[in-house]
Amino acid sequence: METTERNADLVLEGGGVKGIGLVGAVSALYEAGYRFGRPGRVAGTSAGSIVGALVAAGMPVSQMVDVMRDLDYRRFQDGPPFGALGRGLSLLTQLGRYRGDHLRGWIAAQLASLGVRTFGDLRLRDPGSDLPPEQQYGLVVIVSDATNGRMVRLPWDYARYGLDPDEQPVADAVRASSSIPFFFRPYRLRLPRGGKTAICTDGGMLSNYPINIFDRAEGTPRWPTFGVKLSARPPDGLWDSTWAPVRGPIGLGKALMATMMNAHDRLYLDDPAVCARTMFVPTDGVRSTDFDLSESIREKLYAQGRAAANDFLTTWDFEGYLRKWRR
């Protein structure tokens, strides 16, 4: 049976090694006939930016599945010499235990094999679009600029730094978005004037799930925007105190950090219109930095991503969504 192809925009949450769950969801959406990236767009944070870059660059889904299954995440832990001592010194002097060079080199090689190096290679060719020129790209990467205190949308915001968006390497933006604080060294975006540098870290510090990034303030969208979130659906009803229990000063510090990182996105999830277009992929306690994932855990995350997307599609109705939420 032939599948009808349909355009859609896609927003992918960050989650480190849990990104294999995103690939599972993308594969199920692709089998259902949805196509993302030029003219549809993809946005992502951290792991979401990695998967999103591959999608926007046009990597076949079957190849993407193989690439993410075979990826040795442990190689991303490219610390300096001398073991724990070297990583400690790197944290003190470079603000991160690991260089992040392998991650940057890996994604650059994957994109180059698809003919993509700079954001100019991801320019949209969509005569029916009414987007402003600075937003006519197939990929948006979310980054946190610590020196300016801003959430940065690349390539949309490169001009604010005096940089030509079309000339900026996609791999640099993905590397910046994936800079887990204190784990990877921050990405240093060098500005063309004054010798200044912007210190960029994981986009998840400010928005791990930027589901509204493609929303129009007015008018009716031509196609849907789907979101894939690496967590179970939030429970209905009364809130409780089990999300981040506070036990002593260390527990309070962790809870405050988690609150600062998640409050922005959790506010979105209080909106039923957001939940109506979100696929929730349970990740069963896997941490973003579990770089030694077993093959069985990888396959489970992938399967859960597929299951979440397939369950979502059984009830998805774009026209019904527009009638209910975009009157």
Image (spheres, rainbow, N blue to C red):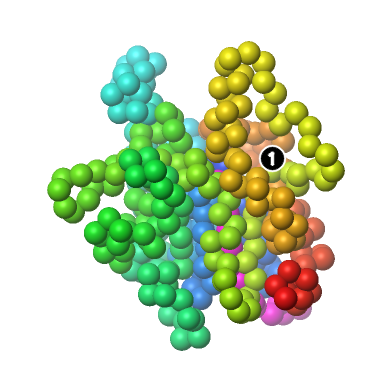
Residue drawn at 34 percent across, 50 percent down: 172
Q: Position of residue 144 (x, y in %)?
A: 42, 45
Q: Residue at x 30, y 28 (%)?
A: 94
Viewer-proximal residue among 241 and 77? 241
In the shown orientation, is residue 314 left or right of residue 210? right
Q: Position of residue 108 (x, y in %)?
A: 36, 53
Q: In this picture, which residue range is highlighted in magenta?
A: 1-14
The answer to which of 129 and 179 lies nearer the viewer is 129
Q: Secondary structure at mark 1?
A: loop
Q: Residue furthest right?
A: 237
Residue at the left extreme? Answer: 194
**Residue drawn 61% across the image and 47% down it:** 265
Q: Is residue 135 magenta?
A: no
Q: Say whether residue 172 is visible.
A: yes
Q: Quadrant of the N terminus?
A: bottom right
Q: Quadrant of residue 211?
A: bottom right
Identified by mark 1, the residue type is: Thr
Determine the residue located farthest toward the bottom in the rendered image.
Answer: 127
What residue is disc 1 on?
Answer: 283
- Relative image position of residue 63 (x, y in whole percent): 54, 59
Q: Is residue 109 left or right of residue 209?
A: left
Q: Position of residue 127 (x, y in %)?
A: 46, 86
Q: Nearer the viewer, residue 248 or 285?
A: 248
Residue at image position (61%, 52%) is 22
Q: Quadrant of the C terminus?
A: bottom right
Compared to 326, does 108 lie above or below? above
The number of numbered discs placed on residues in the rendered structure image is 1
Q: Is residue 68 visible?
A: no
Q: Is residue 7 magenta?
A: yes
Query: Dot 1, how many residues are within 10 Å of its Cα: few (below 14), some (14-19), or many (20+)?
Result: many
